[in-house]
Image (cartoon, helix red, strand yellow):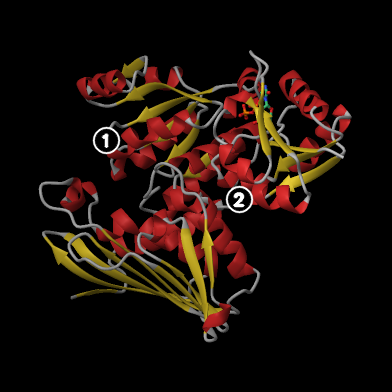
Amino acid sequence: MKKVITYGTYDLLHQGHINLLRRAKELGDYLIVGVTSDSFDRGRGKLNVRNNVLERVEAVKRTGYADEIIIEDYLGQKIDDIQKYDVDIFAIGSDWEGKFDYLNEYCKVIYLPRTEGVSSTMLRAESQEVFRIGIVGSGRIAKRFVPEAKVVSGVEIVSVYNTNNIGAEDFAKSFEINAYSDCYEDFLKSVDAVYVASPHLTHYDYTRRALLAGKHVLCEIPFTLSSAQAKELYDIADKKGLVLLEASKTAFCPSFNHLVTLVKSGIIGDVMDIKASLSKMVSAPTRELSADEAGGAMNEHASLNLMAIIRLLGKDVKKVNFYSKIEDGVDVYTKVNMEYGHATSSATLGIGVKTEGNLVVSGTKGYIYVPAPWWLTDYFEIRYEDQRKNKKYFYSYDGDGLRYEIQEFVSMIVNGRKSSYKLRRSESIAIANIIEKFNKKEKLTIL
Ligand code: CTP
């Protein structure tokens, strides 16, 4: 019996898939079809797949060509499968020409003609409403946002707003964005959603006005510098039925989310302590060193670190203490100690003090170590007293990582989800509350 194997995502099953499966089946007597798992697709950066794995398996089954369907869940699995199932032919569409020649060592590799003019990507684009996003601000982070948005389907950057019209025009030109404006009201009229990437102190006002104008908002960190403002904005979003999401990028990336689920499943026992650090040296003149622009290590870096602590230990912080080194009115170094009653945590933040930016989550059975820079990580380790039990986990962290928050933002809009379990509104308010305490100099020791 001649066995043939082929693989694919088979999202929104189309004629190209059906032709391919028929041709693959005709190559032998028995066809095995490998359908990618949802996590495997996410892990290789395919974030937009519409049908879940069960639906995709069902669709392949309905073609009637597959004698057996298996799930593809890891890189390198094809070699295992070919040997395990004693496969004679590996077949795949000609868009992969040459890419699987390495399998010739295990079986015959055949590239079948691809059906022109149809693909899942095309079907997804055709059937999806495209949300017009406008960017508020044209600084460093806004520049990273544009290429990241391009890899997420269902969004198009249509305009950029800056109080300085020349800055907006330059930005629009360099990123081939059609429109730009220095009038916020006009800008808002041309978009469905807004990405706020302006200076810290303007986040509240731009977000509020966008929400009142009926626009969904993705707002950069620090979201707001007061919990009352954060709450007010979420209340407006709620009343208006809009999505408002704090763009805490690490909160939405695959590695961090898996870390949270592992911790919550008790893999390191009860969490007793978390240490999160982030330092990035800056030199004047820069916004980060300007007291008038809410600079400083805390305003600059606390959001991501507090996000990690709050997602793992919760928002019911019993006591907070700050220790800072202040220069020209801004903290170039701050250590935040947070006590939970049942656990402790600290965030060490610097813009004029350098430290290793790692994350350590200590539990009663073991600890998780995320190497620096922990907020961009694609890797972490779980370590135990008995080192033979240690485990390393690897993930993809594609591009600048903003694609994960954009994907979550769009998915919330499309599915009418007002809160994200990856960063709940109440957690976002709790983060703003701690930043506010610092800015009010509550429990602050100056070093
Ligand atoms: N395929 C094909 N003709 C097409 C589309 C896909 O022959 N027009 C083949 C691919 O070469 C592969 C199999 O179908 O062997 C499954 O491909 P998959 O990646 O699931 O389909 P695409 O439509 O290419 O998906 P996407 O657009 O998400 O990449």
Q: Specify few, some or many for label 1: CA neighbours under 10 Å numbering under 14, 14-19, or 20 or more.
A: some
Query: Do labels 1 and 2 touch, CB within 8 Å?
Result: no
Q: Residue 323 location, x and y as percent?
A: 26, 73
Element marked by disc 2: loop
Q: Is residue 36 above or below residue 298?
A: above
**Which of the two discs, 1 and 2, labels the residue nearer the N terminus?**
2
Q: Secondary structure at mark 1?
A: loop
Residue 248 placement, left or right of 179: right
The amino acid type, in three-letter code, at marker 1 is Gly
Report the front residue among 140 and 125: 125
Q: Is residue 404 visible?
A: yes
Closer to the camera in the image, 317 or 384: 384
Q: CA distance from mark 1 to mark 2?
A: 41 Å
- Residue at label 1? 139
Q: Which quadrant of the rendered structure holds the N terminus?
A: top right
Which label is found at residue 76?
Answer: 2
Kindly report which numbered mark, 1 or 2, lies closer to the viewer in this rendering: 2
Residue 314 seen in the current view: no
Checking the image for residue 162, the label placed there is none
Amino acid type for the residue under numbered disc 2: Gly
Is the CB of the residue bearing disc 1 within 8 angstroms of ligand 1? no
Where residue 243 appears, as percent x and y from the top left, is 56, 37
Q: Residue at x 28, y 26 (%)?
A: 162
Please tell me in which quarter of the rendered image ligand 1 is found.
top right
